[in-house]
């Protein structure tokens, strides 16, 4: 991680031809007053300029729930799932109306795309989604993507404090879109300047982390805090989303969307916000296993198995499994937990839960010819280790 003394240009982000831009609720709204039309218009002008330069732009936009809350006259933070869904139903059309008007003023078309986790879980639906978005981009139309909060249940898991890495906020959605659509750059626009080494509200000497490399990811997520008023993601989800994008081969930048022309400056390669450089991309199937598919069960591993996976890149053998949980089928994705119950990764299991329990007990399932790895290393994705580190940053 590097601080303010590193002011080098960023040629990688500047060269990206397909760009995914996620806009947070607090960028687009002025608290209880609702949307900031001027802020949306400024964002659209910069996005339109990028398209005219020859880039393909995908917007992932929050804001529907906030707009609906304002229209319905709800002053308190909306925490009940059904109330969030009602706000989304009212606010989504208002959000799209604002975008359509602003893009029309630039002589461009935009399209609404509402998604749920199931659109990524099912590979056929995912491939159809990919084809649709690619067709829109070919025709110069800007897709504006949002989670379909009216029908999604994922908000409930978040509100109950579920920390599993599931599709539950637009930061994660943006990372999935960037990786699945082969974007070269993901920009996460929020209401702060980026990720700091400590909470800048509590520590005036806090430094902006301008660059976060792969070697820093094991600890950097612990620096980030949870969601602020009106949002569901928070800095922690943005850091995790940026790490997903970087692993998929896209550069990722967390920056303020409140500062005028920040988007244009980022696309010009200026050192704005916190940059997660792209690194070796995971194959598409592994990206789907690790970050899109819903897990159907859990394998708890002993420490020897954890070390074999992390240090030697081994496949997961039944001898290293302490417990099999769930009722999954062969080919389903399962979570992998360490002896303390901490999530370390995901993999596609070659057999169903009943057979996995027999292999674990040292028994050969009826009809089985050979003893295979429960999860082959080519169908396995390990997550960064996150240590507990001091203060959280906004």
Image (cartoon, grey):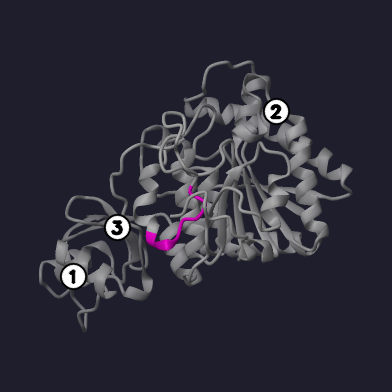
Viewer-proximal residue, 222 or 157? Answer: 222
Dot 2 falls on a residue whose secondary structure is loop
* Overall secondary structure of the magenta section: loop
Query: Which of the two labelled residues, at mark 2 and mark 1, occupies the earlier sequence position?
Result: 2
- Residue 364 coordinates in the image, percent (x, y): 14, 75
Near mark 3 (Cα within 10 A), the count class, few <14, some 14-19 or many ≥20, is many
Residue 311 position by quadrant: bottom left
State left or right for residue 221 relative to residue 11: left
Residue 111 visible in the displayed image: yes
Question: Is 188 in front, or is 167?
Answer: 188
Task: Left or right? Give the position of 244 relative to 218.
Answer: right
Res 359 visible: no
Chain-order first, disc 3 or disc 1:
1
| C-alpha distance separating marks 3 and 1 | 17 Å
Question: Secondary structure under badge 3?
Answer: strand
Q: What is the distance, in whole Å, between disc 2 and disc 1 at their CAs?
A: 54 Å
Distance CA(mark 3)–CA(mark 2) = 40 Å
* Residue 328 image offset from top left, x and y in percent: 31, 59
Q: Is residue 353 above or below residue 102?
A: below
Question: Mark 1: which secondary structure?
Answer: helix
Q: Is residue 379 covered in magenta? A: no
**For residue 344, which numbered disc appears in the image?**
3
Q: What mark, if any, has residue 318 been given in the picture?
A: 1
List the residue tagged with mark 2: 35
């Amino acid at each position: 991680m590097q601080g303010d003394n590193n002011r080098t240009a960023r040629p990688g982000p500047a060269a990206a031809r397909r760009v995914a831009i996620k806009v947070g609720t607090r960028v687009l709204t002025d608290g209880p007053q609702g949307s900031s039309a001027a802020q949306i218009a400024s964002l659209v002008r910069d996005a339109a300029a990028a398209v005219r330069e020859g880039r393909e732009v995908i917007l992932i936009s929050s804001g529907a729930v906030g707009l609906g809350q304002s229209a319905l006259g709800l002053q308190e933070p909306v925490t009940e799932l059904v109330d969030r869904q009602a706000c989304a139903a009212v606010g989504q059309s208002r959000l799209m109306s604002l975008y359509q008007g602003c893009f029309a003023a630039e002589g461009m078309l935009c399209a609404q795309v509402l998604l749920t986790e199931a659109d990524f879980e099912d590979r056929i639906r995912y491939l159809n989604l990919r084809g649709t978005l690619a067709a829109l981009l070919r025709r110069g139309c800007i897709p504006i993507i949002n989670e379909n909060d009216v029908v999604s249940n994922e908000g409930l898991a978040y509100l109950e404090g579920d920390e599993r890495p599931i599709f539950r906020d637009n930061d994660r959605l943006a990372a999935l879109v960037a990786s699945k659509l082969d974007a070269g750059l993901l920009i996460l626009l929020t209401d702060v300047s980026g990720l700091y080494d400590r909470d800048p509200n509590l520590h005036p000497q806090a430094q902006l982390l301008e660059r976060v490399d792969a070697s820093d990811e094991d600890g950097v997520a612990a620096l980030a805090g949870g969601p602020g008023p009106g949002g569901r993601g928070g800095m922690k989800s943005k850091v995790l989303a940026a790490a997903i994008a970087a692993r998929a081969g896209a550069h990722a930048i967390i920056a303020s969307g409140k500062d005028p022309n920040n988007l244009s400056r980022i696309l010009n390669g200026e050192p704005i916000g916190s940059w997660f450089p792209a690194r070796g991309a995971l194959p598409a199937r592994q990206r789907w296993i690790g970050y899109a598919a819903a897990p159907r069960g859990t394998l708890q591993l002993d420490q020897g198995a954890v070390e074999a996976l992390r240090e030697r890149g081994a496949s997961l053998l039944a001898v290293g499994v302490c417990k099999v949980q769930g009722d999954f089928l062969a080919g389903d994705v399962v979570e992998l937990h360490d002896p303390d119950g901490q999530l370390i990764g995901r993999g596609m299991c070659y057999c169903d839960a009943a057979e996995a329990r027999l292999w674990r007990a040292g028994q050969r399932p009826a009809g089985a010819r050979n003893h295979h790895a429960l999860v082959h290393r080519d169908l396995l994705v390990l997550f960064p280790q996150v240590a507990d580190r001091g203060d959280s940053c906004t």
